Amino acid sequence: MKTLMKKLSILIFLAIAISCARQSNKKHLITIRWCTDNNPLRIKQIKLFEKFNPDIKVELLTQLKNDQKLLQMASGSPVFDVLDIYSFAMFKDFVKRNVLVDLTDKFKNESFDISIVWPQTREQFMYNNRVYAFPCNAGNFVLFYNTELFEKNGIPLLENKRITWKEFRNIAKKLTKTDPVKKFPENFGCYIDYNDNNLRSILLWQTGGDWFSKDQNKMAFNYQEYAAALQDLYDIRHIDHSTPTKGDMDSLAQEGTWSQSVGIFATGKIGMKFGGKWEESQYRQNKALGYNVAYLPSFPDEKPYNIFMTRTSAIPAGCKNPDAAYKFIKYLASEEYNKTIAVSGDALPAVMKFAQDKNFMKTPLFSDYKNSIYEKEMKYARFLTFPENFPFYEFASTILKEQAESCFDASQISIKKMLDTIEKKGNELFK
């Protein structure tokens, strides 16, 4: 009997010990919140991080579209521990308001090498030689085109070919077909976002200009070559009718996609559009869609500049779990994380050696040809920056937007009038 009681006592003790251990583990499990986009890939990236860091749980917080609201949330006691930043303007504003943790000393103490990433990304994670974030990915624009529409209309595919803007316009006209009964295009030759700062900047750079003067004291984009390029874009909509109006887009809109234009291209209703690698996850969902990628159009005898984009992650100054958040930031430089970028179509890895490694980038989702187009376009990709004393948020959200809508959407003002007004009002914003 004594032996039995002794065994029971041992079993009870072990049960209590195991229960306490489990409770202890739960108490020591740290939860951090990652404020990012709603890309399905984020779940996979979280699970991979948790696999290597079993003591940290990551919750997803879908990011707001309003940067100013995010700024308010990042101040004081933020509800997130890691924040994704999507633009130079957003990064600069957050740093200047002292709402991001300075990671410089931590990186130095751990000999963390920041030179491993694309040099263009530095504009969005370094400020005055101090480090405030780390890049999650890198990207640029390519030309997506519907191969079936090309073949149906007898247009040669664009493999390993960079067309001119003039050729782009002519192809768009050939691809646009109107239903004779409904008097509405069965498909449009192309889609152009006339309020896209990236496209505006690409055209500006490709015509030999820049937004600001070399001394960064005034705007310097208003000149004949740029105006002519914008006029061609205007004519594509209002003369050729090869790209949909806002009303057309509403009629063609698809639900459940990141953007209207992505959803419509995925249905095969648009012949060509500009965009980044992250869009391909949507296009692959339509198994019947035949499409490919090509280099961006350019002008004869001019450099084929492209836009450089990145998403960086930072830690808000009021973060309650800074050590766990820092582990997540370091995770972004790992081979494992960058492999998720390479194989998924999210973008290009931010770490250059991975993006330039043909074997590392291999995936059934992307041909070597597609990967090579994205990687080669990086040579011409530029980061959109602006002077220290210029409020780009205000400029882009008010002046640029209003003038573009008055010109390209409503046809109320000419290209020259639009550029003159942007230049005048933009110069008034210099502080």
Image (cartoon, rainbow, N blue to C red):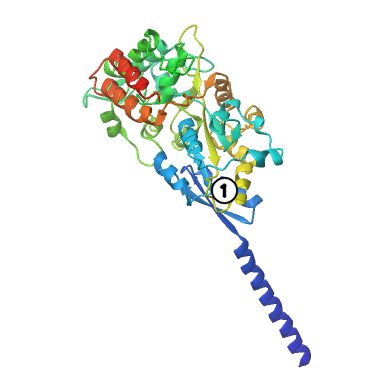
Residue 248 rendering spot, x and y as whole percentages = 27, 29
Q: How many marks?
A: 1
Residue 124 rendering spot, x and y as whole percentages = 53, 32
Judged from this view, the residue extending furthest toward the front is 431
Out of 183 and 261, give the one closest to the viewer: 261
Residue 118 in the image: above or below residue 1: above
Q: Residues within 10 Å of mark 1 (few under 14, many from 20)?
A: some
State the SS at label 1. Answer: helix
Residue 156 in the image: above or below residue 52: above
- Res. 65 in view: no
Residue plotted at (58% across, 53% down)? 321
Left or right for 110, reference 102: right
Left or right for 201, reference 254: right
Judged from this view, the residue extending furthest toward the right is 3
Residue plotted at (43% across, 43% down)? 70
Left or right for 386, reference 343: left
Left or right for 233, reference 81: left
- Give residue 362's quadrant in the image: top right
**Quadrant holding the C terminus:** top left
Residue plotted at (54% across, 37% down)? 312
- Give residue 369's quadrant in the image: top right
**Quadrant holding the N terminus:** bottom right
Q: Which residue is mark 1?
A: 46
What's the residue type where badge 1 is placed?
Answer: Ile
Residue 381 rendering spot, x and y as whole percentages = 53, 21
- Res. 84 in view: yes
Out of 424 and 79, give the one closest to the viewer: 424
Residue 315 rendering spot, x and y as whole percentages = 55, 44
